[in-house]
Image (cartoon, rainbow, N blue to C red):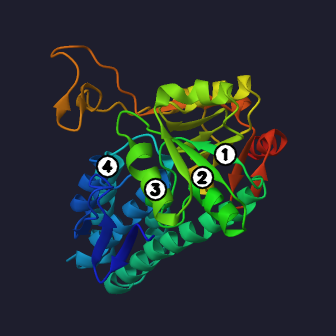
Amino acid sequence: MRTIEWRDGVVLTINQLKLPHETEILELRTCGDVAEAIKTMKIRGAPVIGVAAAYALALTAHHSKAKNREELLMELERAAEILRATRPTAVNLFWAIERVLGKAKKMHDDVRELASAIISEAITLAEEDVAANRKIGMHGATMMEDGDTVLTHCNAGALATVDYGTALGVIRAAVEQGKRVRVIATETRPKLQGARLTTYELKRDGIPVTLIADTMVGYVMYRRMVDKVIVGADRIVNDAVINKIGTYQIAVLAKIHEIPFYVAAPKSTFDINRTSAEVVIEERSPEEVTCIGRERIAPEGVDVFNPAFDITPLEYVTAIICEDGILYKEDIDKIKRKH
């Protein structure tokens, strides 16, 4: 399932707010269109947000009326500032922006050739994401046993990437190898990405999935209904994995019940030079908690705390699966020393 693509100066993407009931394809024509889609979570998932930002810069270059290289670079910088202000936590967004800008700044071609190179770089990022996900799936599938029941949180599937997925990519790869894998998906309040998106993807692929409320995780682990946990990540820092709110408590419960807890993410999600204390955790609208859809469930005027992500210390992580392979604690320690 291709989540996002470039087509002749237009970015086509699935509006994730409409799923699972309606498949609406958005046609994004400007950087502002892409920024709005990211901010409102029509586009969501760390890897695909990064690619969307790259495509937004490509749109800026494609439609630019700049007369010279310097004018185009200024336009790109302004577009980058708009994109950086959309969502602060997922590092892929910033990584993609810097990669495209870095490419542009190194080139000394005329405006048309520079614009073409920027578009090519954005398309390359998208294809690299697909390839990385396939490799993550291949490596991660070696950790899955025939008959496993795997718990996952939020949506780290094709919808969160350009295609295939990270955590769900591991499950897909295992199934493609002939392993019988069942999934338990948490609903993932307050935006219900697990209930709306993960179950949609798995049912579409014919992979058995059972939906549970977030509050049921401890019980299903106590009942020995879970063999492994696998989640995605929005940022992996020196001391922790930052992922959708609720991940930390699942990791703690998994450790208590001696269940392996895996994180699947591409290297573009790694931010090893920072610690968790340096990362801004996005806080979102109170209405996401006080309402389900348009229906208000809480009294007017109640105080709300609504962080979109939480922080899971690496001590709770069994291994990180990336396109280079499976990283255990000693491997992660080596990466830290290099940085």
Image-based side of 243 in relation to 303, left or right: right
User: Where does label 1 land, which residue?
Assistant: 149
The reply to whether discs 2 and 1 touch (Cβ–Cβ < 8 Å) is: no
User: Where does label 2 land, which residue?
Assistant: 167
Task: Report how many numbered discs are placed on residues in the image.
Answer: 4
Locate residue 184, reporting x and y percent: 56, 43
In terms of sequence position, does the residue under pointer 2 or pointer 4 come before the other?
4
In terms of sequence position, does the residue under pointer 2 or pointer 3 come before the other?
3
The foreground one among 311 and 183 is 183
Closer to the camera: disc 1 or disc 3?
1
Closer to the camera: disc 2 or disc 4?
2
Looking at the picture, which amino acid does disc 2 mark?
Ala
User: Where does label 3 land, which residue?
Assistant: 160
Marks 2 and 3, Cα distance to the nearest angstrom? 10 Å
Marks 2 and 1, Cα distance to the nearest angstrom? 14 Å
Classify 10 Å Cα crowding around label 2: few (below 14), some (14-19), many (20 and above).
many
Residue drawn at (67%, 28%), measured in percent from left and top? Answer: 223
Marks 1 and 3, Cα distance to the nearest angstrom? 22 Å
Classify 10 Å Cα crowding around label 1: few (below 14), some (14-19), many (20 and above).
many
Marks 4 and 3, Cα distance to the nearest angstrom? 11 Å
User: Where does label 4 land, which residue?
Assistant: 41
Q: Is residue 94 visible?
A: no
